[in-house]
Image: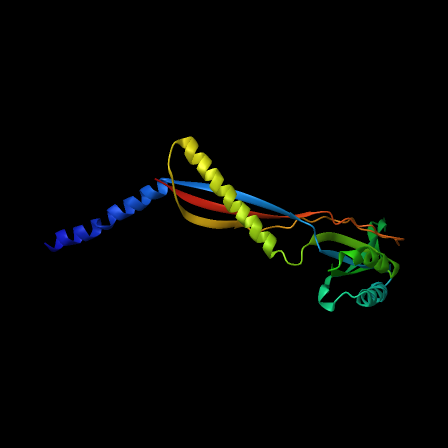
Amino acid sequence: MLRLALIAALLAPLPAALAAQEAALRSLTVTGQGTVAAVPDMAQISLGARAQDETAVGAMNKTSEALDAILSRLTAMGIDARDIQTSGLRLDERWSNGSVNGVRERDGYEATNMVTVRVRDLEKLSDVLKAVLDDGANSLANLSFDVQDPRALQEEARRQAVRDAMEKAKLYAGAAGVTLGPVLTITDSATPMVASGDMPMLRAEAMSVPVAAGEITLQGQVTMVFGLE
């Protein structure tokens, strides 16, 4: 009797497990995407100074002098301290192209000091770039545009992604001749991304630096699993 009771207990979960497996097989998985375009209201750029000297201290001092002037100018133009962050500090040996008796000779040092700056007023961006170039910046890179409060745009992109997924599910179910059941799972499968552009390295003083912000896009992606009746 005990053995029969044990066997019955072991077999009891099987119908439930089989039902769950069958339900998993009778499902439809789709991925929906949504895209929202917006006019950016903020920019971020890496800028700084690069200098060479016979000594390591000399090279670093040159970049430090230029960066002090750049930081002072940024502060004078209303850029908040929280929007300025050191992003690169580097010192490298320089070696001559030729060699003496098969041994290359050191030809001094090169120092680089970069900061990443957020400009929250795009009308100031062109003036900021011109000013820092005049103050000694000789490296600009990684210009990107963004929006300061992307939450509403991200939510709309996600709504569009869900609508896209549901429309696809209805289409596939209708084409397959099956009845679409309830939503079983919803997975946010991608963080909305902001498109950005790159600015090539510049090493020159500028009379003006025209910049076009254009348009950015935020993307949402969702994966949904539907049951099939």
Residue 150 in view, yes or no? yes
Residue 30 percent coordinates (x, y) = 47, 41
Residue 113 percent coordinates (x, y) = 78, 61
To which quarter of the image does residue 225 belong? Answer: top left
- Please indicate whether residue 23 sits to the left or right of residue 199 in the image: left
> Along the line of sight, which residue is nearer the eye, 18 or 101?
18
Q: In percent of the image, x 72 and y 64: which residue is there?
A: 83
Q: In which quadrant of the rendered image does the C terminus lie?
A: top left
55 in relation to 37, above or below: below
Q: In percent of the image, x 17 and y 51: which residue is there?
A: 8
To which quarter of the image does residue 78 belong? Answer: bottom right
Residue 112 percent coordinates (x, y) = 79, 59
Q: Which color scheme does this rendered protein use?
A: rainbow
Residue 132 percent coordinates (x, y) = 84, 60
> Along the line of sight, which residue is nearer the eye, 10 or 106?
10
180 in relation to 141, above or below: above
Residue 109 in view, yes or no? no
Question: Which residue is at the far left?
Answer: 1
135 in relation to 225, above or below: below
Q: In which quadrant of the rendered image does the N terminus lie?
A: bottom left
- Please indicate whether residue 218 sits to the left or right of residue 166 in the image: right
Q: In percent of the image, x 83 and y 57: which residue is there?
A: 127
